[in-house]
Image (cartoon, helix red, strand yellow):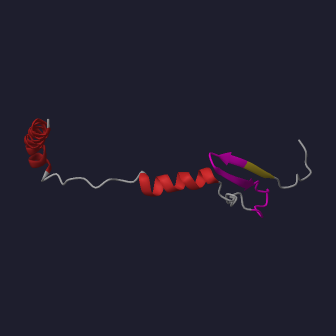
Amino acid sequence: MDTEKKPNREITYQVGWKRGKIRHESQDGTEQGRGKPDELPRTRIETVHLFLNRYLFRPVPTVSERLLPYVLWTLPAVSFFVCLTLVYILIRTA
């Protein structure tokens, strides 16, 4: 094999939207092998993607487990009452 030293090289990679560089470690360990992802200017698609993930697709508050059975038991009665009210309103206006 070659006994002469090869110059350090950088390997660039891209995973999804992120790009980065990895520096090859030399034999004597003088150079670090970990690289930082490049800071690229954000495109419009990235900005929209960040907005959607931050504000639109976030966890929704739910009813506590203690109240959930009461809500589920009263939901059919409430929806039946709403349907009767709508029918009554339609009959009176027709």
Whole-percent x, y for residue 67 in the image: 12, 53
Q: Nearer the viewer, residue 4 or 81?
A: 81
Residue range corresponding to the magenta coloring: 13-31
Residue at the image position 12 percent from the left and 41 percent from the top: 89
Front one among 82 and 93: 93
- Residue beneath the point at 82% across and 53% down: 9
Asked if the stretch drawn in magenta spans residue 25, the answer is yes
Q: Position of residue 53 (x, y in %)?
A: 47, 53
Q: Is residue 35 above or below residue 86?
A: below
Residue 6 falls left or right of residue 91: right
Q: Quadrant of residue 61?
A: bottom left
Q: Residue at x 75, y 50 (%)?
A: 12
Quarter occupied by the N terminus: top right
Indicate whether residue 8 is drawn in magenta.
Answer: no
Residue at image x 10%, y 44%?
78
In the rendered view, does 82 fall on the left or right side of 9? Answer: left
Where residue 29 appears, as percent x and y from the top left, is: 75, 61
Rendered position, 27 above or below 83: below
Image x and y of residue 47, in percent: 58, 56
Left or right of 38: which side holds 53? left
User: In the picture, which quadrant includes the C terminus?
Assistant: top left
- Residue 38 occupies quadrant: bottom right
